[in-house]
Amino acid sequence: MASTFVDVLVQRAAEPSAAAFDVVDRAGSTFLGWAEVDSRARAVAASLAGRGLTGRRVAVLLPPGAAYVTVLLGCLYAGAVAVPLPPLPPAEHPDRPRRLAVVPDAAPAAVLADAAPAAVLADAAPAAVLA
């Protein structure tokens, strides 16, 4: 019997074709089976653990979508503490400074973001930025 959420995910991965998520975003619809979710989450977890982030806060600034789901689950697999934050709006957006200010307040050991905001976050975050 599964004792943790990660245990449940690993059990579900034994049913590779079973539907895990059907993520609908601006790019369209992405179907993820349990085996694919498990594989992607393990890759994220290995990267986080390899950087010594187990037990540490990791800010996640990704838009809704398949990557967001697998990164959050990868944090769970690695034993890292996911800190979901809203993705950064465009440079001219009035909320951008406020959202940038939240990152250091969260005191993450690392920030996971798309490549586009990674350069901006490098100046705002006192942590490694992993794009």
Image: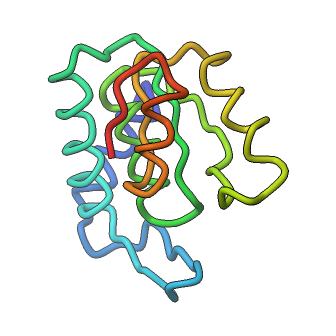
Residue 31 lies, with reference to residue 94, above or below; the image says below
Which residue is found at the position 42% from the left and 16% from the top? 109
Residue 47 lies, with reference to residue 23, above or below; the image says above
- Observer able to see residue 94: yes
Q: In which quarter of the image is residue 43?
A: top left
Q: In this view, does 94 lie to the left or right of 8?
A: right
Look at the image and name its color scheme: rainbow
Locate residue 6, reporting x and y percent: 38, 35
Comparing 24 with 63, the one in front is 63
Q: How many marks?
A: 0
Q: Is residue 99 left or right of residue 47?
A: right
Quadrant of image for the N terminus: top left
Residue farthest bottom in this picture: 28
Locate residue 63, reporting x and y percent: 57, 59
Q: In which quarter of the image is residue 101?
A: top right
Locate residue 28, reporting x and y percent: 52, 88
Residue 94 lies, with reference to residue 45, above or below; the image says below
Residue farthest right in this picture: 94
Comparing 83 with 5, the one in front is 83
- Observer able to see residue 1: no
Which residue is found at the position 49% from the left and 50% from the top? 117
Q: In this view, does 3 lie to the left or right of 23?
A: left
Locate residue 12, reporting x and y percent: 33, 54
Q: Quadrant of residue 114?
A: bottom left
